[in-house]
Amino acid sequence: MKRIGVFICHCGINISSKVDVKDVAEYASKLDNVVYSTEYKYMCSDPGAKLIQASITEHELDGVVIASCSPRMHEHTFRNVAEDGGMNPYNVEITNIREQCSWAHDDPIEATAKAKKLVSAAVAKAALLESLEKSKTPVIPEALVIGAGIAGIQAALDIADDGFKVTLVEKEPTIGGKMAQLDKTFPTLDCSSCILTPKMMEVKNHSNIELMTYSEVTKVDGSVGNYRVNIKKKARYVDLNKCNGCFDCTTACRISGHVPDTFNLNLGKRSAAYISFPQAIPLKATIDPEYCLMLKFGKCGDGPLCVKACEPDAIDFSQTDEDVEINVGTIVVATGYDLLDPEKLFEYGYTRSRDVITTLELERLISSSGPTEGNVVLPSSGEKPGSVTFILCAGSRDETECTWCCRIGCMSALKHVYLLREKLGSEVEINICYNDIRSFGKGYEEFYRNIRGKGVSFFRGRPSEVRVHPNNITIDVFDTTTNKLFEIGTDLVVLVPALVPRADSEEFSRIMGLSRSGDGFLLEAHPKLRPMDTFVNGIFIAGCVQGPKDIADTVAQASGAASRAAAILTKDELENDPLIAWVDPDVCVGCGVCVEVCAYSARVLNEVSGIAEVDDALCTGCGSCIAACPSNASIHKNYTKQQLVRMIDEVL
């Protein structure tokens, strides 16, 4: 028979304000198998931990029930406390009498009665808990970083500086991400390239970083400490060892100036052979198979001009995609974000006028390396605009598109006001239509106040429609500050669109085995305590893949994710949580259903015995196989049906 101790936490007044904890402790002391029961104000504090450990020794406890807040918060804490007290940590049972009891009820009598039921159910389960032992897995001291924007670059550099090899994978031909498309950054107005390019050069020259651009992760197997990752290196049709980045092939290409320039958001044209921008890393050409005449038709005039122009003989049309497999101990995901497709916002006229653009398109017009060499002109006519109107929250904070704030939109618009004044002078009229100006970061409010003195008209309201006319554009907006309806005539409309998950985020999350939140961004393990962790051990997230954020927060989170990854890589081996599934060989019929439903490839059918087997290192204890098994052969350790039925009997 087990000797169980019950410990009831007041959680300050979070629990005790609704639950009579002394009454619950007295009730628990009379339950079967309970030899000690007490209550304390903060059970998760150091005195609370010492109380539990002393009780384990004094009363020779081999089972502990903690009635407190969510086990998601403190289960690992109390397991460690019990282990330090000399008891097997998996003989600890947590019952949640805060979120599921005191916070859920207003009537103290009902809350106390429910708390007693929950405690009695936990005691019933604790009597059937088994002592479990952790298995161990060796750690491969290498990391993978997916995505080479500023978040991925920072994470890769931090891990590499700690002495570990890093494979940095980027799906575009060059690293840099969205930040490479920016002209300046707020609120300091630093040149974006001046900040980013040195980081890119560090990546290129770092001895611990292997850079794989124009590549995509296609499959991830294994578990923390030993992930097997398949990467597809797309054919560039250029030998990277020979190419010297001279740009000769890009200017010689027969269709030069006829291919939409995606880096410049189709505001300009490039050739089929291209280098995205002058500071590209690696500074190597890529040939676009969608437009290259040789790759599409097998013929390019009387011979490819790019081949003739290339002195190093780097053009290689025989290249094919290559599959590479690597083994790493940890993974950092930093794949970034997309901007909301403005074509979805029909009322704002993006599809009806070339002079309705987005903030990122304005960045490329302002940039000296952009399609207009820094001259801000109307895309439709090439003339300078006399009036520019910004529409903030285009698609964000909206019930129909994106309910969240993009976090960078207000400051981006204010930055552009400063740059437009610098480029076009004081004569250009600038209007901003906004819901609220959110200047939450360090130096942001001061920057906002500075911009307000630059002759800008602010209209607090969301425009109802953008109407396109032959000679100009008009906007109707009701200003809630003055309670007046205004009609704004303007030459150029700049939409500040929402930040949304990447278009491939659903497929990518499936490949990685990661969860997504309701907004579609990757879900962190805990928004406050584990903001860089995911629910898959050893995989961390950084930057806007988790949700909208500015550059400063992105870099901070990337360094945090790198630190979490490096903490694993420093260990020779890891202990695996034993709260996983196992298979009863006397009951299993080898149907394979559990193999099909396992999202972590932790199930295999033994070819000799025909019985399902569990890979302890891969199993996360999610329970899918237990629910799916038609013969009840799949069993979750310390979550058995006998334990759960005993709990239900106590509650009922």
Image (spheres, grey):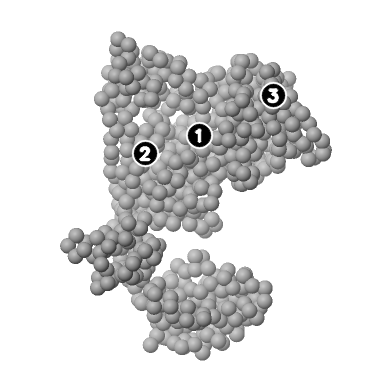
| Label 3 element class | strand
Instruction: Decide which of tag 2 and tag 3 comes sooner along the chain.
Output: 2
Tell me the mark number nearer the camera, choosing from 1 and 3.
3
| Label 1: how many Cα within 10 Å (few below 14, some 14–19, many 20+) | some
Total numbered circles? 3
Instruction: Estimate the x, y position of residue 571 in percent, counting from the top left.
Output: 34, 57
Q: Is residue 295 left or right of residue 550?
A: left
Q: Is residue 386 left or right of residue 11?
A: right
Give the x, y percent position of residue 402.
Answer: 59, 44
Using the rendered image of the protein, determine whether residue 207 is visible from the camera's viewpoint. no
For the point 54% across and 41% down, which residue is it?
A: 500
Q: In the rendering, which numbered label is found on residue 216? A: 2
Mark 3 Cα-neighbour bin, 10 Å: few <14, some 14–19, many ≥20? many
Disc 1: which residue: 178
Residue at 68% x, 18% y is 470
Whichever of callouts 1 and 3 sits on the residue coming sooner in the sequence is: 1
Q: In whole angstroms, how far apart are the C-alphas of marks 2 and 3?
A: 42 Å
Residue annotated with mark 3:
473
Which numbered tag is attached to residue 65?
none
Q: Nearer the viewer, residue 235 or 367?
A: 235
What's the amino acid at mark 1?
Lys
Q: Does any portion of residue 98 appear in the rendered image?
A: yes
Q: Is residue 188 above or below residue 403?
A: above
The image quarter containing residue 611 is bottom left
CA gap, disc 1 to disc 3? 29 Å
- Give yes or no for contact between labels 2 and 3 (Cβ–Cβ under 8 Å): no
- Tell me the amino acid under the disc marked 3: Ile
Local SS, label 1: helix
User: Mark 1 or mark 2, which is nearer to you?
Assistant: 2
In terms of depth relative to the viewer, which is nearer, 252 or 422? Answer: 252
